[in-house]
Amino acid sequence: MTHSTTLILLTVLVSQVYTAPQLITFNDGKLGVNFGGYHAAVGIGGLGGKGGATGGLFAEAGTPYGQSAKAGLGGAVDSKGGSGGKNILLILDVLIEIVIILYFY
């Protein structure tokens, strides 16, 4: 009886680990955190397999309600050919939000 209960409990725990959202992720060349739908990420452009179309440091953050902020330093090119970046105050603001999210976790 105890072996079957232990096996069932272990199966449930393993399934929860693999289906639960990841708190810390690393994909597309960026390091991200996600907690309660609030998310933030930082990275170095050009590492996401986009053929070097993006470059420089960037930071982004968002809420579960759809608001988001993104900023980068140098080299980012969007689909319309416009370059982004060089807004250091916005990057600092996003990085502060990331620190706040990590602190309250």
Image: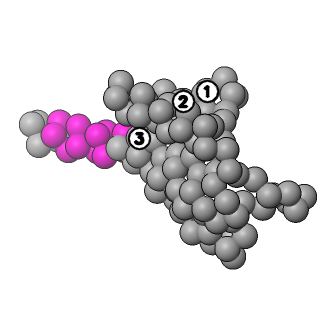
Q: Percent position (x, y) of residue 65?
A: 66, 23
**CB atoms of marks 3 and 1 within 8 Å:** no
User: Toward the viewer: 3 or 55?
Assistant: 55
Residue 90, above or below 31: above
- Disc 3, SS: loop
Say whether disc 2 or disc 3 marks the residue closer to the N-terminus: 3
Q: Is residue 7 magenta?
A: yes
> Which mark, residue 50?
none
- Which SS does the magenta portion mostly show? helix
Does residue 74 show up? yes
Residue 8 visible in rendering? no
Q: Dot 2 corresponds to which residue?
A: 37
Mark 2 secondary-structure assignment: loop
Q: Which residue is mark 1?
A: 64
Q: Quadrant of residue 44?
A: bottom right
* Residue type, label 3: Leu
Q: Residues within 10 Å of mark 3 (few under 14, many from 20)?
A: few
| Three-letter residue code for mark 2 | Gly
Say whether marks 2 and 1 touch (CB < 8 Å).
yes
Q: Nearer the viewer, residue 52 or 23?
A: 52
105 left or right of 52 in image: left
- Residue at the image position 9 percent from the left and 37 percent from the top: 2
> Is 21 situated left or right of 85 in this image?
left
Label 3 sits on residue: 23
Q: Say whether disc 2 or disc 1 marks the residue closer to the N-terminus.
A: 2
Rendering coords of residue 37 (x, y %): 54, 30
Residue drawn at x 11%, y 36% is 1
Question: In the figure, residue 12 lies in which quadrant?
Answer: top left
Find the distance from the CA under tag 2 to the CA under tag 1: 5 Å
Residue 98: where, in percent of width, then height? 47, 36
- Over which residues does the magenta segment extend? 5-16
